[in-house]
Amino acid sequence: MKPAPFDYYAPATMGEVLALLREHGDAAKLLAGGQSLVPMLNMRLARPGVLIDLNRVAGLTGIRQEGDTLVIGAMTRHAEVERSELVARLQPLLTEAIAQVGHIQIRNRGTIGGSLVHADPSAELPAVLAALGGSVRVAGPAGVREVAAEDLFLMFFTTSLQPDEVLTEVRLPVLPARTGWAFEEVARRHGDFAIVGVAVTLTVADQRATKADDLVITGCRIALTGVGMTPVRAAAAEALLVGRPPSQAMLAEAAAAFRAEIEPDTDIHATADFRRHLAGVLTERALGRALQRAAERGGGR
Ligand SMILES: Cc1cc2nc3c(=O)[nH]c(=O)nc-3n(C[C@H](O)[C@H](O)[C@H](O)COP(=O)(O)OP(=O)(O)OC[C@H]3O[C@@H](n4cnc5c(N)ncnc54)[C@H](O)[C@@H]3O)c2cc1C
């Protein structure tokens, strides 16, 4: 199939991008890796009159550390993030999750910014951003603003970005000491979107008041994909775990609390009951792996 006709621009600077967005308004669409947009154009699910290609715009790629923050340019490809030693060291939850995005051909072209702005309710990266409490930087006519994960995703395929704004950077907190992580998902076939996926971080400390090697959970963040219109935080389960010594029974209790809390939809991929069941199983499994990693990591980073 072929897309409807459009005018194509390949600007070299962010200033030119913003000027084109101002000029063309709602008629314009930004093109990043094209892994979601191009199929939508070809199926004529999207019919923008103007396509603004971000691939030649300077300053939108790269991975760096800024103090306790890992900063990734919006146009950085999934594959580069997946292979980055800096990401693996500072935020291994992202390394684990991004490897599950589609197939390697998709990850060679797809970008971290495109995945977040596309906001597919089954995508891995929105759940990772939510679990980590990360944020994005957005450039627009009024300058640059920072948007926290909880304010970014509004509903299916919809973020709080305005049509004249561009996501420029993804900002993730560096994984704290004694913190474990895990990303788990179930998809029908390798490379498919997840039916349900879960991103977890879990922090432990020694409970010196009792025995020196007893642990207590001091922090826990859980976010799921595939169980709602946006990434869903498991707030009740997190609250159940924090402040208590970890045990397999407690992890199961927290997963059960989350299962009871959510109201997924039935669609062509899975029934609501199956999604709820998966959410419980995967949350318990991810918590178990995160706990093991937290216990093994000792005091250092
Ligand atoms: C076979 C197949 C399997 C896939 N499996 C998965 C999967 O398992 N998990 C998953 O998450 N994804 C999956 N995808 C989607 C893929 O990961 C896309 O790469 C991703 O969703 C979008 O990134 P992109 O860079 O290709 O963006 P594009 O397709 O270029 O753009 C997507 C949308 O984001 C907007 N946009 C892009 N960049 C910016 C920016 N910087 N600022 C503002 N707006 C922007 C575009 O205007 C467009 O609306 C799959 C795709 C295919 C074809």
Image: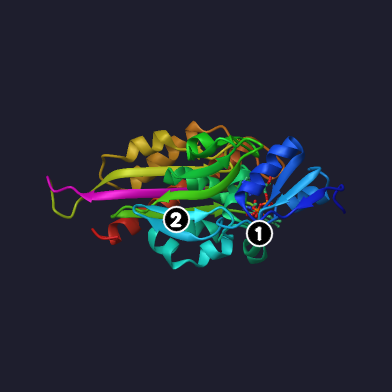
Mark 1 residue type: Arg
Q: Count the marks: how many?
A: 2
Disc 1: CA contacts within 10 A as few (<14), some (14-19) or many (>=20): some
Give the quadrant of the N terminus. bottom right
Q: Where does residue 261 sit, x and y in percent of width and height?
A: 48, 32
Q: Secondary structure at mark 2?
A: helix
Cα–Cα span, label 1 and label 2: 29 Å
| Labels 1, 2: front one | 1
Q: Where does residue 137 sit, x and y in percent of width and height?
A: 51, 44
Q: Is residue 265 above or below residue 216?
A: above
Residue at 75%, 39% (x, y): give it.
24
Characterize the magenta stretch by its predominant secondary structure: strand
Mark number displayed over residue 93: 2
Magenta region, residue range: 198-209
Give the quadrant of the C terminus. bottom left
Mark 1 C-beta to ligand 1 under 8 Å: no
